[in-house]
Image (cartoon, grey):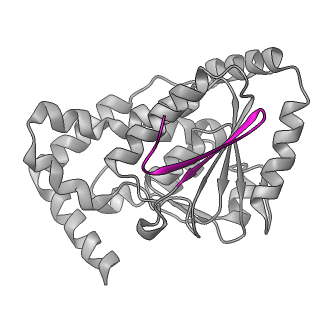
Amino acid sequence: MKYETLKIVEEKETIFVTMNRPEKRNALSNLMKRELTDVAKEISQNDRCACVVLTGAGEVFSAGNDISEIDDIEKVSLTEARNLVRLGADMCEAWEKLRAMTIAVVNGAAIGGGTSLAVSCDFRILSPAAYFYAPEVELGLTFSWNTLPRLGDLIGPARTKLIGALCQKIDASKAMNWGLCEDVGEDPMSLARNLAVEILSKPRMAQQMVKESVNRHFQSPNTAYLEQDQILLSLVAGESRNLHHRKRRELAS
């Protein structure tokens, strides 16, 4: 399958997926969210694949949801709008459920949905310039895509609130200290390749069984669709739309 927004490279039992919109800071357009969902499902059917490495082209992992598409919600029916706002939740769920081990190489900023995608992977390796930032509350929205339960499992409730409710930026050093990543280095892709070699050295079926057991044990109830409905209602109400437009002007200036 060919992808417009992704670059796929297969090296034996490892597949490298690169979000390839560097001119848009790898913002998650509706098309990219669909393609990231599709590629995760496609890889799940690939019995040869034992490890997937996800990264972003250029100097940013992902700038998060493509806010230039917010206006699209006004142009479609409420049912279609509901399907659009659920794309991110579907994407994260598809990556979390991949049978192969997944490594997010966070080579720069991971903002909003970029953070959501990174914490849907099994492991995270950061460059020193990388950081996590969730500005949703500043936009009058909740941090969604079932990210809060995933963060809570990784770093606990208080630190999750610092990210999700107080919108604190978490740099690479703090992420390492908090257990939000497994390693930090100037060449995070090399570190990811080393981890992939370690993954490939273990019996695959037993490894996948451990992954499934761990995920099942820590998996919180999936509230992603309820969160997305809240976001949709906020956007329709208008307050969050005004905040989005203001944030877009700030980013453009």
Depicted 107 relative to depicted 44: above or below: below
Depicted 52 relative to depicted 110: above or below: above
Quadrant in the picture for residue 191: bottom right
Q: Is residue 10 left or right of residue 5?
A: right
Q: Quadrant of the C terminus?
A: bottom left
Taking the spot 72% from the left edge, 69% from the top edge, the residue there is 128
Q: Nearer the viewer, residue 85 or 139?
A: 85
Please check the rendered image and state whether residue 185 is part of the magenta-colored stretch, yes or no: no
Please check the rendered image and state whether residue 8 is part of the magenta-colored stretch, yes or no: yes
- Residue 211 at what x, y percent from top left? 72, 23
Q: Is residue 37 visible?
A: yes
- Residue 143 at what x, y percent from top left? 39, 47
Taking the spot 22% from the left edge, 72% from the top edge, the residue there is 246
Quadrant in the picture for residue 82: top left
Q: Which range is magenta? A: 1-19
Q: Nearer the viewer, residue 116 or 53?
A: 53
